[in-house]
């Protein structure tokens, strides 16, 4: 075993944990917060709740919410300019993966200069970032825990993966109550994203015991509680999805992802589709592609999906993948690539782009453009 | 579920990870390291290896090794004076729980002033500590990961528990190669300490999914790999004990401990016995004491110890405790309290002291002096 690294933020988890945000900001030296969210969240009541919490601690803040789903490079630069003009000192984000990744990009460019494109890839950030406190409003992206930020380069139509330990926020405040105001679609796409994080990190060649137990726990919780939460919208069930998302993020941030996410980033950059809804299309075929080099681990996933083992690892793995396909189908989401990509001729370009993504580096089976095409053809 | 907190250091794990120590120290701003170890480690070759690593990065250091097993209050004050006199800026420790806890105490008193006694209990530290990098040479204490420091007040003959998030080191560098030079006795006492951390944190009322999976994994690994490691002294087996110790520490640091550790601190303060060797005596009886309020969880522990479930949770729990007693016996350690405490009349004083320890606060069953006496009588 080579030297492995495990880095996560300080975590506050639980109902009404939002109230700790201002105390945490002050502890990190905040006088003027740069607060990032998105237009959707502005319409929810949570922003006002949060502003009251800031005010109670006499904190000033600047509010930036010009963040698209799949945040754009120019939004990062606009935000960074505002951060510097206003003399902010701590970055606080509330939202799903998009505002959180935008907040990371803003913190990065404001402190390290240049353009966000300069940092694409792994370990390219030299100088420290301002303190960051993130409050996820979905249970999936894991950006509040991870060393990943995904930002779209509009000109190249590429979702860039920026990966660095310094992108791990200082504090993640996870309040599952926020999930009670989310749509069914968002609960599903977030949970599936977390499931894909758990699966890919589990199969990574740099997974080890401490990441693996989180991957497995996340899969188990999502299989059990996603259907329940959709039926009940009960806080107890939603809370389990929050835990699953957090565990999956602790795993993938430290063990990495794989070709499912590389392809999802490529598809997302080109077609601007909802990230979490790409996995049901790809993941079963990615598992079949990877199975030849990590059968026992795919069988472990199968055991969780099926709730039991079959006679051989191969049987368990195969039946698990089939059950997973049925599970995705039961959620009412698209399960064929043709439902997402309008033209089959785009596939080779998508694969050419995906092979450049840093996520392919931690895929268990060596990835080639041909291999990715094989996955896309099977998923078509 | 109330608001729970989960805080761990950045972790480097693996063979030869020691070499990262100086780069990490520099990243945290080190120019002059305060290096803490103990006389036993000075005789091993590891100190010279480390000094070469420091030198390669042009780091200066001050070396403090006047640390006893169960570190004393006056050693903390002596070390803190030296830290300040020498103008050090980062604390680095190499060793087992004693030098690491001493290093925490030194960092605390050097930055917050006063005497180490001033901080006894939970959350009494106001000002930040200097950056800390810890390298555990045993797989058990978890001090490199935890928010605990245990220091003996010589005059009162009390092991004080000091608990604060600020005592979590910045970086833990866990190199399992260090274990290859350890004695059989030390491997056993460290692994049993980690096992007790795992058990007590699992039963804590503030345990939650993220701590529980670490508790369970630690128990599983220790049951499986401690006997193997003792027979083989093989690095693969020892590495699994390192992972177990780390997982157990991630759990107990965030979920707390219980009356086993409260009594162990009290016994250790009065009699200066090896901490890890107190648990085989107490833990089975602590489990019987707690079982009445958390039968299902004690049955989970039983399932790991037995490798299977019996007909009912009660049967699994009881048989698990018996098997655990046999397991401790097979390791050749003392399993009766009378083998450690010379005079039975001391027991009530030990229990009176233990009830003051912060660890009783996270015991699942309300602890009373009578309850602790009942445990000690059963263990006698």
Image (tube, coloured by chain):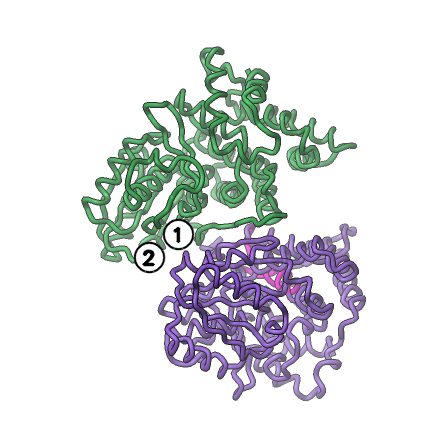
Chain colours: A purple, B green
- Relative placement, left or right, of B44 versus B287 is left
Residue A312 counted in the magenta span:
no
Q: Is residue B380 above or below residue B45?
A: above
Residue positioned 48% across, 33% down in the render: B358
Q: Nearer the viewer, residue B161 or A342?
A: B161
> Is residue B166 or residue A211 the one in the foreground?
B166
Give the mark count. 2
Residue A11: which numbered mark, if any?
A: none
Residue highlighted by disc 1: B170
Q: In the rendered image, is residue A25 in sight?
A: yes
Q: Is residue A260 left or right of residue A132?
A: right
Q: Position of residue B146 (x, y in %)?
A: 45, 43
User: Which quarter shows the C terminus of chain A?
Assistant: bottom right
According to the picture, the residue beneath numbered tag 2 turns out to be B28
Task: Find residue A253 and report its horizontal and vertical position in percent.
Answer: 53, 62
Q: Residues within 10 Å of mark 2 (few under 14, many from 20)?
A: some
Q: Residue B294, image x and y in percent?
A: 67, 34
Identify whether B110 is placed above or below B98: below
Magenta residues: mostly which secondary structure?
helix
Q: Residue at x 69, y 27 (%)?
A: B318
Is residue A317 visible in the rendered structure shown here? no
Q: Is residue A26 above or below residue A148?
A: above
The segment highlighted magenta reads A194-209
* Chain identity of mark 1: B
Residue A19 vs residue A209, the one in the foreground = A19
């Amino acid at each position: 075993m080579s030297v492995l690294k495990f880095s996560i933020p300080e975590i506050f988890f639980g109902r009404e944990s939002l109230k700790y945000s201002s105390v945490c900001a002050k502890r990190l030296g905040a006088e003027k917060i740069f607060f990032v969210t998105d237009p959707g969240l502005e319409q929810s009541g949570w922003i006002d709740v949060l502003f009251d919490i800031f005010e109670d601690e006499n904190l000033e803040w600047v509010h930036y919410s010009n963040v698209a789903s799949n945040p754009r490079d120019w939004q990062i630069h606009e935000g960074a300019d505002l951060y510097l003009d206003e003399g902010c000192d701590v970055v606080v984000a509330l939202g799903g993966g998009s505002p959180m990744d935008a907040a990371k990009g803003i913190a990065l460019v404001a402190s390290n200069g240049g353009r966000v494109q300069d940092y694409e890839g792994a370990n390219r950030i030299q100088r420290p970032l301002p303190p960051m406190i993130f409050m996820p409003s979905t249970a999936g992206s894991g950006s509040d825990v991870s060393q990943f930020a995904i930002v779209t380069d509009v000109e190249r139509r590429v979702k860039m993966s920026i990966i660095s330990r310094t992108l791990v926020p200082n504090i993640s405040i996870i309040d599952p109550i926020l999930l009670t105001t989310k749509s069914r679609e968002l609960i599903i796409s977030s949970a599936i994203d977390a499931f894909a994080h758990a699966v890919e990190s589990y199969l990574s060649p740099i997974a080890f015991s401490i990441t693996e137990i989180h991957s497995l726990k996340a899969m188990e919780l999502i299989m059990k509680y996603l259907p329940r939460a959709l039926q009940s919208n009960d806080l107890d069930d939603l809370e389990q999805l929050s835990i699953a998302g957090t565990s999956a993020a602790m795993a993938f941030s430290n063990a990495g992802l794989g070709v499912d996410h590389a392809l999802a980033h490529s598809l997302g950059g080109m077609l601007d589709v909802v990230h979490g809804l790409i996995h049901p299309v790809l993941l079963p075929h990615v598992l079949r592609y990877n199975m030849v080099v990590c059968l026992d681990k795919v069988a472990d996933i199968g055991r969780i999906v099926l709730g039991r083992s079959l006679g051989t690892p191969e049987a368990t793995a195969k039946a698990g993948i089939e059950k997973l396909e049925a599970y995705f189908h039961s959620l009412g989401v698209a399960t064929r690539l043709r439902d997402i990509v309008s033209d089959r001729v785009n596939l080779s370009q998508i694969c050419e782009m995906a092979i450049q993504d840093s996520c392919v580096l931690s895929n268990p089976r060596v990835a080639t453009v041909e291999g990715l095409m094989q996955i896309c053809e099977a998923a078509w």
